[in-house]
Image (spheres, rainbow, N blue to C red):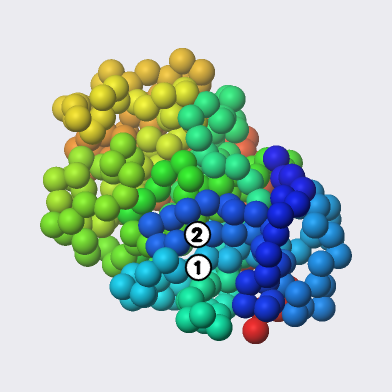
Amino acid sequence: MPRKADTVSSLFDDRYHILRTLGRGGMGTVSLVQDLSTAEGMPSRDESAPEFHGFALKVLDSDHLLGAFLEAFELHRGLVHCAFAQALRLGIDEHGQRYAVMEWCRGVPLSAGSLSNAVLTAQVGRALLEGLDHLHRQGLAHGDLSPDNVLVEQLDSPRIKILDLGASGSLGSGAGSVSGVLTHLAPERLHGGGLSVRADLFAAGVLLYAALEGEHPYPDYPRVIPEDSSRVRCVKAKVLEPWLERLIHPTPEERFPDAIAALDALTALVPDLGESQPEAPLNLPFVD
């Protein structure tokens, strides 16, 4: 749940009031900030207040990661879909530290045991697949779908944000290297295969299964890679079992061919999902 800012705070680049640390990624530290230069200023430091205006400030740790840092920012700028955080501004402070200002996303990680039933899981799954479909239609794959990289905000219907495109790239790229959270990488990626639509679907399936059932679908993965998904069982949502089995099949050819095919199969199983997450991103306070 949103909480009030920490009492200890500081100013970054004479502009951004740092409220608290949101986390650390492979490229740097991400903080929740308010922009003192905007017309909104700091009407409230309470994150739960409707008038609260916050941003995510990502400060690059090392310039040798600059290329990947800039590439991830530009990837975000090209994704005009509400499932992805908007990239707003690049900057360099007086000490030469490079940073990016991003949309701050409310919500909690899609962690193990965080989804309670079939309908909620299907709603989150639909939103996740719609976001992935948008990404894949740009010729890109995420490559690192894991609990910390998918946030869920519980409203009348859940909304999601897909974060951290640091491991993303063009479909087919990245062959011969392994990056991302190993427990959520598809077997073919663990063996050096390139970024792909079906590998992203495998990771999405692992995320959704673990969020529903509270554990990874494959014990000891990735140390032990199963031959098929026939032993996968859904205790809390039997109706989703065949759908999840196909999403997380160890053989890519046995998975759904794309996010839309997976989405069609999901809505056939759970037809009453309510309204979809709106595709267009929300308008944010201007950041120059």
Q: Is residue 15 visible?
A: yes
Q: Residue at x 40, y 62 (%)?
A: 27
Decide which of 215, 241 is in the foreground and name it.
215
The tag earlier along the polypeptide, 1 or 2, is 2
In the visual, does 210 lie left or right of 253? right
The quarter of the displayed image where residue 168 is located? bottom left
Instruction: Describe the element under mark 2 as helix, strand or loop.
Output: strand
* Residue 169 placement (x, y as % from top left): 31, 65
Decide which of 276, 178 is in the foreground and name it.
178
Decide which of 109, 141 is in the foreground and name it.
109
Residue 2, compared with residue 231, is above or below; it is below
Q: Residue at x 76, y 64 (%)?
A: 53
* Residue 58 placement (x, y as % from top left): 52, 65
Residue type at mark 2: give it: Thr
* Residue 197 placement (x, y as % from top left): 31, 53
Mark 2 and mark 1 in contact (Cβ < 8 Å)?
yes
Q: CA distance from mark 1 to mark 2?
A: 6 Å
Query: Which numbered dot is residue 29?
Result: 2
Q: Is residue 229 visible?
A: no
Q: What residue sits right under mark 1 in the picture?
A: 59
